[in-house]
Image (tube, coloured by chain):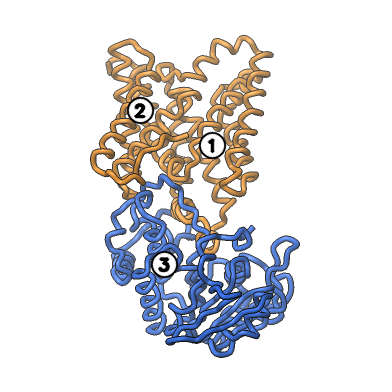
Chain colours: A blue, B orange
């Protein structure tokens, strides 16, 4: 069964077309690495799948139905993270607020939710964050809370928007490993956007590469090739495979590095 | 002190208002919307003078104006980045109207001091009932929206994706703030609403990082400061609002100092509310 289907989809923000004529199908249980330069539309695509952005053309199907906001089967880790600088709330309450957070009434969190939060923080090596104030955390620490939040509640589709940004190498590996394990166990489908392909090589089933308004979905061998990437980057690209790693080069420099710390305004939603 | 009816009334009214202000204020501080609360109370001044012009009790003008302004602010501010501008524009407009009303109703000038700085010692039994009803409505509303409100305050992008009606929620919250401000202005006046709505919750957030403990502490501190302020005023003959403001400020700075001795990380260095 296909978890996600796009047929002739065009996504635009205002007058500007971000992605055009995208048709693809993602099968249940697949781990898809979503790659591409800043502004290529990774965030926009996820927002469309979440039902936050209506496609200008074409049709999106999530679990066979039109996307709708608040679908509990979808776990989401947003990239634009507004955190008020002076937030004196502990990590546990931050995560707890997102569990069933859209329901009306008073927040009530039972033992089961508490255990779920602690267990997930343990997996991510972030248990100590439960009692610390958000305002005292680094960007990477807040991000681990957001990842924990996305994984709790057994979602069947996970949309993770740049979950590795501002994590150090060790926590990047832990994050990838936990997402992989949790999803394999539950048969969940993952869309995992990132700037660095090599870390995900051992984990991902297929790659969704965005660029130049287009999207190409396929295996690493099919997509990470000079002709395909040259088309997506609109410049001459060389692909070098060495020692189990893949390097995407443009005029002698790797294209992934150096870009990923800057958020282009295109990546933001309106 | 409790032999006087006006003191009993004052304690009852201040108690009701302090708890409501502390609880609503906790979310105001958490959402970084203290400027909106500040603006709403000043807008209430226009409402109070306008009510005087029409021959109504100032409280109804306060409620009407702050509620309308709260709904308007909520409806017109979309993103956090331009929220303060929207609030500021509405504030300036409302203060202009307040001046106009005062211009045409000069007899109100004597009452204006009470609106600006509060007059809790003049509270009568019917007013207490009104405040109790106002407080009950505000707390019921807050209870109804608290869960999505916390979610939307802490994680706006995620809350939007999870189906929280962001603008409606923000508008509903500002309406509740408007009601709390109106009640609070009866005790400490529109100029000093911050003493109960921002001072205690801000201090509480410095002292605990737990959500429920923070709420309880905010309400408790607010109540303690209001009642202690009344007692000090009774024995010293200083204005009540001054005494409460003194305690509120002392509580906040004491909390800052207490926190400073516990944590030394630069990220936790205190910054004053707007």
Quarter of the image that includes the C terminus of chain A: bottom right
Identify the residue position indicated by label 3 in the image.
Answer: A147
Residue B211, percent from left and from top: 35, 49
Alpha-carbon span between mark 3 and mark 1: 32 Å
- Please rate how many residues cluster around mark 2, counting C-alpha atoms within 10 Å: few if below 14, some from 14 to 19, many from 20: many
| Whether residue B121 can be seen here | yes
Q: Nearer the viewer, mark 3 or mark 1?
A: 3
- Please rate how many residues cluster around mark 3, counting C-alpha atoms within 10 Å: few if below 14, some from 14 to 19, many from 20: many
**Extreme left residue here?**
B261
Tag 2, which chain? B
Q: Secondary structure at mark 2?
A: helix
Quarter of the image that includes the N terminus of chain A: bottom right
Tag 1, which chain? B
Alpha-carbon span between mark 2 and mark 3: 39 Å
Give yes or no for contact between labels 2 and 3 (Cβ–Cβ under 8 Å).
no
Question: Vertical placement of B133 versus B118: above or below?
Answer: below
Residue A194, percent from left and from top: 50, 72
Instruction: Say yes or no: labels 2 and 3 on the same chain.
Output: no
Q: Which mark is residue A25?
A: none
Residue A211, percent from left and from top: 64, 74
Q: Nearer the viewer, mark 2 or mark 3?
A: 3
Label located before the other in sequence (2 or 1): 1
Identify the residue position indicated by label 1 in the image.
Answer: B36
Residue at 62 percent of width and 79 percent of height: A237
Q: Which mark is residue B248?
A: 2
Q: Quadrant of residue B97?
A: top right
């Amino acid at each position: 069964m296909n978890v996600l289907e796009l047929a002739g989809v065009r996504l635009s923000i205002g007058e500007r077309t971000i992605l055009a004529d995208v048709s693809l199908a993602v099968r249940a249980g697949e781990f898809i690495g979503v790659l591409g330069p800043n502004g290529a539309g990774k965030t926009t695509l996820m927002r469309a799948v979440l039902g936050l952005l209506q496609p200008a053309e074409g049709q999106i199907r999530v679990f066979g139905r039109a996307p709708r906001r608040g679908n509990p089967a979808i776990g989401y880790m947003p990239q634009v993270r507004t955190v008020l600088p002076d937030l004196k709330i502990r990590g546990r309450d931050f995560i707890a607020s997102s569990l069933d957070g859209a329901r009306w009434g008073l927040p009530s969190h039972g033992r089961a939710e508490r255990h779920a939060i602690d267990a997930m923080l343990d997996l991510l090596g972030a248990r100590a964050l439960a009692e610390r104030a958000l305002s005292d955390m680094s960007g990477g620490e807040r991000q681990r809370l957001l990842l924990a939040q996305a994984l709790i509640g057994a979602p069947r589709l996970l949309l993770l928007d740049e979950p590795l940004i501002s994590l150090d190498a060790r926590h990047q590996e832990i994050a990838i490993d936990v997402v992989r394990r949790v999803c394999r166990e539950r048969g969940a489908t993952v869309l995992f956007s990132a700037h660095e392909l090599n870390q995900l090589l051992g984990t991902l089933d297929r790659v969704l590469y965005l660029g130049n308004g287009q999207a190409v979905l396929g295996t690493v061998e099919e997509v990470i090739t000079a002709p395909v990437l040259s088309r997506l980057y609109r410049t001459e690209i060389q692909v070098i495979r060495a020692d189990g790693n893949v390097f995407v080069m443009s005029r002698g420099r790797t294209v992934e590095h150096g870009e990923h710390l800057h958020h282009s305004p295109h990546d933001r939603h309106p | 002190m409790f032999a006087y009816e006006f003191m009993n009334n004052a304690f009852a009214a201040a108690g009701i208002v302090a708890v409501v202000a502390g609880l609503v204020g906790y979310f105001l501080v958490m959402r970084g919307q203290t400027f909106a609360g500040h603006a709403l109370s000043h807008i209430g001044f226009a409402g109070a003078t306008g009510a005087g012009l029409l021959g109504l009790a100032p409280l109804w003008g306060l409620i009407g104006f702050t509620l309308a302004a709260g709904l308007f602010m909520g409806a017109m501010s979309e993103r956090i980045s331009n929220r303060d501008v929207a609030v500021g524009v509405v504030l300036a407009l409302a203060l202009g109207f307040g001046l106009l009303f005062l211009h045409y109703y000069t007899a109100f000038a004597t009452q204006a001091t009470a609106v600006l700085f509060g007059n809790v010692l003049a509270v009568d039994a019917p007013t207490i009932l009104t405040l109790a009803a106002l407080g009950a409505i505000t707390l019921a509303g807050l209870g109804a929206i608290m869960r999505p409100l916390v979610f939307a305050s802490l994680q706006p992008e995620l809350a939007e994706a999870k189906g929280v009606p962001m603008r409606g929620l923000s508008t509903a919250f500002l309406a509740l703030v408007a009601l709390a401000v109106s009640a609070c202005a009866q005790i400490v006046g529109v100029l000093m609403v911050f003493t109960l709505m921002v001072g205690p919750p801000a201090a509480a957030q410095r002292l605990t990082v737990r959500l429920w403990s923070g709420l309880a502490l905010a309400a408790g501190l607010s109540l303690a400061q209001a009642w202690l302020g009344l007692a000090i005023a009774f024995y010293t003959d200083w204005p009540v609002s001054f005494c409460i403001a003194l305690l509120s400020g002392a509580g906040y700075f004491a909390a800052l100092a207490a926190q400073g001795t516990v944590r030394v990380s630069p990220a936790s260095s205190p910054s004053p509310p707007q």
